Amino acid sequence: MANYDPRFATEAKVVGNDYASDGDLGFKNEVKGVFESYSSKGINLAYDFNGILGSQLERQNFCDAITESFQNDSITTDSRMKAEPFYDNYTERFDQLLNNSLTTIAQEAVMQGYSPIVAYTPFFLKKQWVSCIFKDVLMTEVPNSPVFNLPFERRYIKDQDGNRYEIPDVFYDNETMAKLNAAATGLSFKEDLEIDLPMKNVDVLVEKYFPGIVVNDRSNELTQDLRITEVYFATAKKWVPCDITADATTHTWLPKQLTDGAEEPEFDSLMGKVNFEDGTVSVVAENEKITKIKMAGKLANRWNERSLDVERKVDQIQKMMPESGPRFNTAITVEEASDAMALQKIDLIADNVDMMGRSLAEFEDHEIRSFLDNSYDRQVQARNSGVFGYQNSMVVTGRYDAMPYTGFTGLVSDWLTQTREYFERVIEELKHKLKTTEAVIVCVCNPTLVRYLGAGTGGVDWVFDSNTTISGIKIAYQFGIVTSAQDRIHLITSEYVSADTGYHMYLIPTTNELITYKHYKYNMVIDRGYRNPTHSLVPNVMATHRTLTFEVLPVQGRLTIDGRDLFSPATLAREGVGSQSFGNLQP
């Protein structure tokens, strides 16, 4: 049999329906349009791009041409996107990423003396940016330097002993709040101090009954909240609660008859006077049946001698991009390039660069997903091993069984409406972990789980669906907004998330006081200056990027959906014995 030469093969004709589609057609047309636009000015981007890199003005004009298509996309024109944090600057973040990458390329071209394939880089960087799904989960930010300082603001209440209590956590601790409130006001009366009667002005002073008081301190003035809270009847050997205050004008104790509550009750009343300025008190029992009292109250703090401080502290978290990220190399021989052009009308270099950009986007998605999964597993393991209790854990775990319980007599669709309730319960618990409303709630899940959210009230307001294109690129995920009673939740669907792991939920704070997870993307580079590690004697194209994911407060939650079986539950009540009806599940 003669040797087969594909160059002389005849294309086979197949009669049938052609459903072929190109999700990147608009993107390819944009690349072609930009090249043709510069060609009309006498500039060949494939060979003259170094001149554009060398001029700051020309480089900015080129960046504007690349980002122009964003201006007409739903990512920037949809009113719902403009109202969502981190989406209102979608184009600006990509513009910074593009500038970082072009600056790196220009520096390498000068230092190493070669001409990289810079004409393709901006376009495929754009494709990588749009295609990356999880950059929208963690709301990717773009620094202008590989080394950056992240301000991490904290606010404290500080007492006079120098102890700091972090805001807002301290506001949820009743015991600490009571302690700080006492420290910020006048000194309180000694708790449960039993005072023998009679009390006389001449020998009873404030310093005897208020702990920590300084004799002759000018703040030793009583306030109007001084009161007698309990009295002791010696005859009945019984403490009786009461609430007796001094008249604001006469400063005498308001008359009140007291009884011990016995079958044959004893009666008594108290008399006396309060000198608020001198801090002296007199109390006498009229019938001397009351022999002891308990009091409560505070000293005046009008001289501002007892207070708390508020303090703002900024910690600098310094991070550095990895020295290098994942690298792709492709060796291209002259024969491969010419055959691809002759047989398939394909620019093999451009096609390989396209695949590199797509692969880097997939690697970045995998990096973020793996980081979040590992973080969740570590937190769950620590919680289960008793390192900290459930309430102190940074993760929230929930579960809902889509299979109705034994004896349930309603429709399965009615049962599934409760999924939304448990979804929102996990959200509320997540918010409690940070004790803040200044955060974006992001949920990512497998598309098959969306129906369980739609079963409840509200449903999903889809902004991007499976047919949406951004800058000519058909995106591989859906984006919608779930509105609950108090929250707007970003919902992102991805086939990369297993349906078995349920809904993955993250809190992304919009304030510098809190940091949960951060993802930073610095640059992407494609060039021909590196040799292929295996085939070093033929032309080579290399692509790489630098990204960084880290955590500070690893708050995330998951709600798994069990019972997603394909068979109707045998436990549900049915009409008659042995009924084979799978549609009517009512009794």
Image (cartoon, helix red, strand yellow):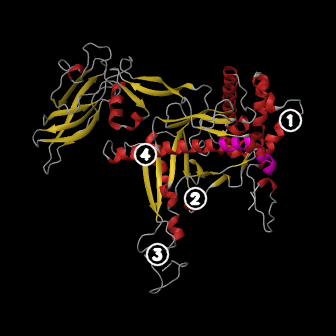
Between 382 and 586, the residue placed more toward the observer is 382
Q: Residue at x 90, y 33 (%)?
A: 40
Q: Earlier in the sequence, mark 2 or mark 1?
A: 1
Q: Select label 4 or label 1 by which is in front.
A: 1
Residue 447: tell me if it is visible.
yes
Q: Which residue is mark 4?
A: 395
Tag 2 and tag 4, C-beta contact below 8 Å: no
Q: Which residue is mark 1?
A: 37
Name which residue type carries label 3: Thr
* Whole-percent x, y for residue 249 in the image: 35, 26
Q: Which mark is residue 450?
A: 2
Q: Earlier in the sequence, mark 1 or mark 3?
A: 1
Q: CA distance from mark 3 to mark 4?
A: 35 Å
Dot 1 lies on which element?
A: helix
Q: Residues within 10 Å of mark 2 (few under 14, many from 20)?
A: some
Q: Which mark is residue 409?
A: 3
Q: CA distance from mark 3 to mark 2?
A: 25 Å
Q: CA distance from mark 4 to mark 1?
A: 52 Å
